[in-house]
Image (cartoon, rainbow, N blue to C red):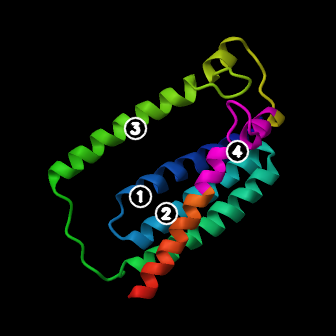
Amino acid sequence: MDSVGNIIIYFIIAIAILIFSFKAVTSKKILRAATYLLFVLLGTAVFYFQMGYQFLGAVQIAVYAGGIMVLFVFAILLTHKPNEKDAPLRTHRKLWGVLVSIAAAIVLIFAVFYMPLIHGFSLVDCLSASKEITMHDIGVAFTGGDKFQYLLPFEAISVLLLACIIGGVTIARKN
């Protein structure tokens, strides 16, 4: 990440991710929004490759850009008619959406910095004490079952995704 070329590529990809994420949220056509989300996920994979984490980049492309996006597109096509005209949101709903989004962003930022992550230390503790967090520590935190480790929530999310797939198939078969 030291050369000028890498820095230029970093900023180009970062700007592209910002633009596509904004377009994914503001697009009125749901298939276009899913396509913009695909570009955001691919841009994130480019970041992983640029930092030297080839495995994470490959997983990002295979799981998120590949599998999850196919799931999104099929779910959209099974539950929503692409040519269907939707009524635009009313102003008070947009205001509530913006307020809830801002509140959720504040809570998430607070959680990222102050929630215990590795060995009971938060990100603020690690940054202030100059403790080094290795990839091994992050891997153990994500796949461990002890306190402050995330195997159980990860498995709960996978069961939730499976339930969503089964629900989508059930809804599609009833129509």
Q: Is residue 100 left or right of residue 41?
A: left
Measure how far apart labels 3 and 2 are at the Cα level: 22 Å
The residue sitting at 28% across, 47% down in the picture is 97
The answer to whether residue 93 is left or right of residue 57 is left
Query: Of label 4 and label 1, which has the lower sequence position?
Result: 1
- Mark 3 to mark 4 CA distance (whole Å): 24 Å
Q: Given the image, on which type of amino acid does mark 3 rest?
A: Ala
Q: Secondary structure at mark 2?
A: helix
Which three-letter amino acid code belongs to the residue tagged 2?
Tyr
Which quadrant holds the C terminus? bottom left
Q: Which residue is mark 4?
A: 151
Mark toward the viewer: 1 or 3: 3
Give the quadrant of residue 150: top right
Please determine whether, in this image, residue 133 is positioned above or below residue 46.
above
Query: Closer to the N terminus: mark 1 or mark 2?
Result: 1
Q: Which mark is residue 36?
A: 2
Q: CA distance from mark 4 to mark 1?
A: 33 Å
User: Tag 4: Cα neighbours inside 10 Å, few (<14), some, or many (≥20)?
Assistant: some
Instruction: Describe the element under mark 3 as helix, strand or loop.
Output: helix
Q: Which residue is mark 3?
A: 104
Residue 85 sits in which quadrant? bottom left
Q: CB atoms at circles 1 and 2 under 8 Å apart? A: yes
Label 2 packing within 10 angstroms: few (<14), some (14-19), many (20+): many
Query: Image point 65% across, 49% down: which residue?
Result: 154
Along the polypeptide, which appears first: circle 1 or circle 3? 1
In space, the residues marked 4 and 2 are separated at their CA atoms by: 30 Å
Q: Which of disc 4 and disc 3 is earlier in sequence? A: 3
Question: Nearer the observer, disc 4 or disc 2?
Answer: 4
Q: Residue at the location (69% across, 30% down)?
A: 147
Q: Amino acid at mark 4?
A: Leu
In the image, the segment drawn in magenta is 137-157
